[in-house]
Image (cartoon, rainbow, N blue to C red):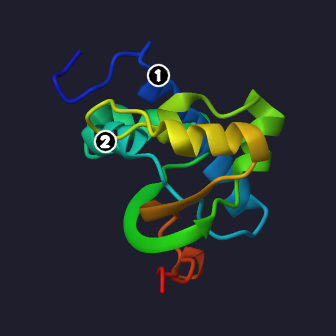
Amino acid sequence: MSSTALSPISNEHRELGRFLAVAGKRFAAGHGPAEMFSPAVDAAWHRMLGTPEYAAFSAEHAGSVLGHRAVNGFGPIGWVATYEEAYGPLPEIWFTDADGVVDRTAFARYEETGTVVAEWDCGPTTGDRDDAAPSTRRS
């Protein structure tokens, strides 16, 4: 396995696959891109992008090869219910930064309310002009 590829058993790798599957479903239903709010999962995505393994991984999970684009925002994460229907509650890796530190407050809020309100700086793209969601920033 190349140094840029992920271990198939890592939490980040598993959750990236699930995220791409949810993103693919959103695009297929005509919805905008899923918000990538986890620095840990996003770091895994960045390690895979551009590798020969990524195209196959994305196609396997999303049904096509999804790209990655910068798109900033803050607000409710719109895909949580779709994720939960398919996989159950979000694991704490979604609330973990790139250094492995869990935001216990955000995770507890999610466990109590079932909703996630977060900041994001990227999301998937199909390459189509109409797959971009408008940026929303904290005022």
Q: Which of 119 and 79 is in front in this view?
A: 119
Q: Name the outermost residue toward the right.
A: 85
Q: Residue at x 68, y 62 (%)?
A: 27
Q: Residue 115 carries which label?
A: none
Q: Which mark is residue 11?
A: 1
Q: Residue at x 48, y 73 (%)?
A: 73
Residue 70 seen in the current view: yes
Query: Which label's residue is closer to the chain start, 2 or 1?
Result: 1
Residue 67: percent from left, percent from top: 42, 58
Q: Is residue 27 above or below residue 130?
A: above
**Residue type at the position of mark 2:** Ala
SS label for mark 2: helix
Instruction: Read off the residue under disc 2.
Output: 43
Q: In which quarter of the image is residue 102?
A: top left
Residue 59: percent from left, percent from top: 54, 40
Q: Name the outermost residue toward the bottom.
A: 139
Q: Nearer the viewer, residue 108 or 27?
A: 108
Query: Horizontal placement of 12 versus 64: left or right?
Result: left
Q: In which quarter of the image is the N terminus?
A: top left
Q: Residues within 10 Å of mark 2 (few under 14, many from 20)?
A: some
Q: Name the outermost residue toward the front.
A: 105
Q: In this view, does 30 lie above or below 46?
A: below
Q: How crowded is mark 1: few (under 14 residues within 10 Å), some or many (20 or more)?
A: some
Q: Between marks 2 and 1, how big is the CA–CA gap?
A: 12 Å
Query: Horizontal placement of 73 versus 7: left or right?
Result: right
